[in-house]
Image (cartoon, grey):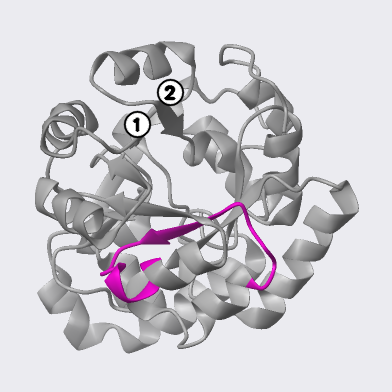
């Protein structure tokens, strides 16, 4: 949800009783400053900030913590160098993991909460184990740390299932992408509404075309396009001819041409039938006290 989950979305989720997280991506300080202004304007203090650990700027954690988030969420990389700083700032350290080994390492580093991301999830992650296979394995390996489930969950039934397998809560991505407050073009959000889980594919096609190229072992789940139909599974060939496709994708993004432009999305698309306020998505779950 890097840059899709901005300040308006995070504030709306927290105001509705969830826990909103600003998707800070690689830690662009100017972008984050603008989005945190929306959080301040909404007068909602209970939000977090998320960062993509493997490629974030050298001062990204320090800068994010300057906004005094309730939690800092680290994904896709070793969180060890940052846990002490997070705790010293009085924030909760949330670590997203895609394997049991990553979960054990994050727990050993001092993570306060683990987010188990299954391969159903939209965007980047591990293409291997599905959530409901991964979740009980992590729960067994890290029994003393609160566990959050991520990947394909859109409603209370998903939360109930996740709790039965050891989770304390769930993280929503794609379901909150299809909201009025999310930062993207209306055409991209409508693409979520018009698609189903079978329309998604894991690949590194868009990493090669729009960058950056992620570390080995990560792929991205997105809605199929003419580019993934042509190149998914042929990425080695794509590397040799990628240059003209970079400009093609940039043009498609500028023109909101969704037959080419990437839209990251998970397998929970079947349950997304409209673009609506974020509070409606939160309301699908058992009532909680706003904070």
What whole-number distance in Å separates the C-alpha atoms at marks 2 and 1? 6 Å
Horizontal relation, residue 47 to residue 103: left or right: right
- Which label belongs to residue 270? 2
Q: Which residues are magenta?
A: 66-83
Residue 141, above or below 56: above
Of labels 2 and 1, earlier in sequence is: 1
- Secondary-structure class at tag 2: helix
Q: Are marks 2 and 1 in contact (CB under 8 Å)?
A: yes
Residue 219, image quadrant? bottom left
In this view of the protein, can residue 276 be seen by the observer?
A: no
Front residue (pair 232, 87) = 87
The image quarter containing residue 75 is: bottom left
Quadrant in the rendering for residue 240: bottom left
| Image x and y of residue 100, in percent | 12, 46
Q: Could you tell me which secondary element the residue under label 1 belongs to?
A: helix
Q: Which mark is residue 197?
A: 1
Check if residue 99 falls in the magenta segment. no
């Amino acid at each position: 949800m890097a840059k899709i989950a901005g300040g308006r979305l995070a504030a709306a989720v927290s105001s509705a009783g969830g826990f909103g997280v600003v998707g800070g991506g690689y830690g662009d300080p100017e972008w984050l400053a603008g989005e945190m202004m929306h959080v301040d304007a909404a007068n909602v203090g209970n939000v977090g900030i998320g960062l993509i650990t493997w490629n974030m700027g050298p001062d990204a954690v320090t800068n994010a913590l300057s906004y005094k988030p309730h939690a800092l969420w680290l994904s896709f990389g070793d969180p060890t160098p940052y846990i002490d700083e997070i705790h010293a700032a009085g924030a909760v350290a949330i670590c997203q993991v895609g394997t049991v080994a990553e979960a054990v390492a994050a727990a050993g580093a001092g993570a306060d909460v683990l987010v188990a991301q299954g391969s159903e999830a939209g965007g980047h992650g591990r293409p291997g184990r599905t959530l409901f296979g991964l979740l009980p394995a992590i729960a067994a390996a890290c029994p003393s740390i609160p566990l959050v489930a991520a990947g394909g969950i859109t409603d209370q039934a998903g939360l109930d299932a996740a709790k039965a397998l050891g989770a304390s809560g769930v993280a929503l991505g794609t379901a909150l992408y299809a909201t009025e407050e999310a930062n993207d073009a209306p055409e991209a959000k409508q693409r979520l509404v018009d698609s189903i889980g079978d329309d998604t594919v894991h690949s590194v096609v868009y990493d090669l075309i729009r960058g950056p190229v992620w570390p080995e072992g990560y792929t991205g789940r997105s809605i199929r396009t003419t580019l993934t139909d042509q190149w998914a599974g042929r990425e080695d060939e794509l590397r040799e001819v990628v240059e003209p496709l970079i400009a093609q994708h940039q043009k498609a993004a500028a023109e909101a041409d969704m037959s080419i432009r990437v839209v990251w999305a998970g397998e929970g698309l079947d349950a997304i039938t409209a673009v609506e306020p974020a509070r409606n998505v939160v309301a699908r779950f058992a009532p909680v006290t706003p904070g």
